[in-house]
Structures are given as C-alpha cells and as structure tokens.
Amino acid sequence: MVFYSLITGSSGLLGKYHSEALLQINHNVVLTDKNLDQLKKDVKFFKKKYPQKRILGLKMDITSKKNILSVLKFLKKKNIWINNLINNAAIDAKFKRDSINLNKFENISLKVWNKEIEVGLSGAMLCSQIFGNEMVKKKIKGNILNIGSDLSVLAPNQSIYMGNKKKLTFIKPVTYSVIKHGIVGLTKYVASYWANKNIRCNCLSPGPVLNKQSLQLQKNLKKTIPLNRLANMNEYVGSIKFLCSDDSKYMTGQNIIIDGGRTIW
Ligand SMILES: NC(=O)c1ccc[n+]([C@@H]2O[C@H](COP(=O)([O-])OP(=O)(O)OC[C@H]3O[C@@H](n4cnc5c(N)ncnc54)[C@H](O)[C@@H]3O)[C@@H](O)[C@H]2O)c1
C-alpha cells in the first residue's frame, strides 16, 4: 500500500501552493484538475523541482461520479491509496461583462445555480464520499480538508465591487455563499460521521488573495480587512501543512479562517 494525497483543482491559483505544501511535508501527491493542459505543465514543473517525490497528474472532473470512480480504480490498480484529500476545486470565477445582470439575485437562473453548486458543493461531497469511503473500508487513518472562504461565514459585501465611477462592476452570486456555507456543513457532517473511523475532516477558509484584481477592488477590499491588505498566494502553505499532518491530529470538524481579520469586522 502506497499512500498519496489527492488535490482537486490542483492547477488553479491556490491548488499549486497546496500541492507544493504537501510535497514539502513529504507527501506523495496525485494532482487532479479538469484542465489537462495546465495539469501536464504543473506535473512537469513539480517533477523537475522535486525529482525524488512521487507525483501523479490525472484529469478528473469532480462533477462526474463516473470520472472520480475511474480515477479511484486506476489508483487502486497501482496500489495507490488516498489518505489525504483536499477538496479545493472551484468553478472558474470569471468577471464576465454580463455577470452583473446574470449574478443579480433576482435574475440567477436555476441552470447557473445547479452548475455552480455542482462544482463547488456536490463535487466536494462526491470526492469525500468516494475517497473517504475507501479510507474507511481499508481502515486507513485519513484526512479530508475542504477549502472554504471568508464567505463561508460572512455575507458578501457587494459594495467592494463599486468601481471608480460609483457603478457596480460585479455582483458576487448567491451560489458562492451557499457553496461556502455548505462546505462548512459538509465538513462538520463528515467529521462527525466518520469520527469513529479514524477520519478527520476540517475546512480552511482563506480571505481574498492578491491576484490581478483592479486597483479599485484592492482598495475597497483592504478597507474591509483589519490587516489592510489581501493575502499573498503563499500565505496558506503553513496552514495546509498543519491541517494535513499529525500536527492537527486532535482537530476535526473545524473551520479555520485565515483572512487578515476580515471576519472580525
Ligand atoms: N483565490 C482566492 O482569493 C480565494 C479566496 C477564498 C477562497 N478561495 C477558494 O480556494 C479554492 C481555490 O481557489 P483558486 O483561486 O485557486 O481558484 P481557481 O479558479 O484559480 O482554481 C480552481 C481550479 O478548479 C478547477 N476546476 C473547475 N471546475 C472543476 C471540475 N468540475 N473538476 C475539477 N476541477 C475543476 C479549475 O480548472 C481550476 O484549475 C476555491 O475553493 C476557492 O473558492 C479562493
């Protein structure tokens, strides 16, 4: 039996940092994403940087139970067992030109609602169900880490999207709130359900990460954050190492919020 950590949405902005955090604490990793081109580049990059480590890259769409099961089957054939899962994937959050109207609560369509919930919430449930159940069946000491957001406990303050012409440039859709609050519910449920099976489940809730936001948005956001800045991309690495190792072995069902203090205001 060889143990690996599996990360969903590993090719995104934070997924790469989560993957590297795990490599640094000597985990073998299965990087998964639906974006195969980027995934291939990431595997190449990490194999070059960490030549001694076991690194696999597999295309996996978390909205497809069939696809997740085929990944599981492939891994089992290679005697690879997942003892640590990070549910990190999220729907591509594009600031589309038409997103203001589409994202208005009164306009949100059931199609958009279902699609977004499918990725952010159902995908995390399916991966937890499938990989968690294998941990249970094989009596593996397992860990599941869900990625939430400061919006797992806060309602979005839409005024941060006010542009310099005093016009809203974006509206955070209701789906994001529902997904991220739901992720905390999923975390507590799984933590409690499998507590006696040696499986822990926690949630890491990051605040906004600095990444090409407009200067106006950065300025508006900073005003809502006591530390008066957005997070740097690498500022969750330490918490990933903590939450995915025995350093947190007495912790389960918790939502750890790392947000520059945003949720205390
Ligand atoms: N970036 C931030 O500021 C921030 C802040 C708080 C919380 N978060 C949370 O952190 C996590 C990662 O965020 P990010 O900024 O890296 O996002 P990102 O959009 O950069 O990456 C998400 C990844 O998920 C993948 N993905 C999308 N749909 C998928 C599917 N159906 N199956 C498999 N993979 C799929 C995408 O291809 C992408 O690589 C998310 O859960 C997000 O909500 C991010």
Image (cartoon, grey):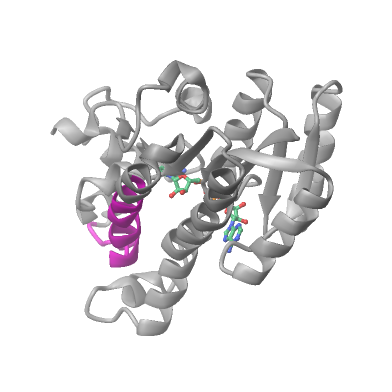
Seen in the picture, residue 187 relative to 101 is either above or below; the reply is above
Q: How many marks?
A: 0
Q: Quadrant of the N terminus?
A: top right
139 and 97: which is toward the camera: 139
At 45% across and 27% down in the image, what residue appears? 243
4 and 204: which is toward the camera: 4
118 and 83: which is toward the camera: 83
Q: Seen in the image, is 153 located left or right of residue 112? A: left
Seen in the picture, residue 54 relative to 203 is either above or below; the reply is above
Q: Seen in the image, is 135 located left or right of residue 222? A: right
Seen in the picture, residue 232 relative to 143 is either above or below; the reply is above
Q: Quadrant of the C terminus?
A: top left
> Is 251 inside the magenta-drawn segment?
no
Residue 206 visible, this angle: yes
Residue 101 appears at what percent x and percent y? 32, 76
User: Magenta stretch?
Assistant: 166-187
Residue 208 visible, this angle: no
Q: Seen in the image, is 180 located left or right of residue 23? A: left
At 56% across and 42% down in the image, what residue appears? 85
Residue 43 appears at what percent x and percent y? 79, 40
Q: Residue furthest left?
A: 265
Q: Seen in the image, is 32 located left or right of residue 17? A: right
> Is 175 inside the magenta-drawn segment?
yes
For the stretch drawn in magenta, the main secondary structure is: helix
Residue 126 appears at what percent x and percent y? 51, 61
21 and 140: which is toward the camera: 140
Residue 115 appears at what percent x and percent y? 46, 74
At 32% across and 31% down in the image, what residue appears? 256
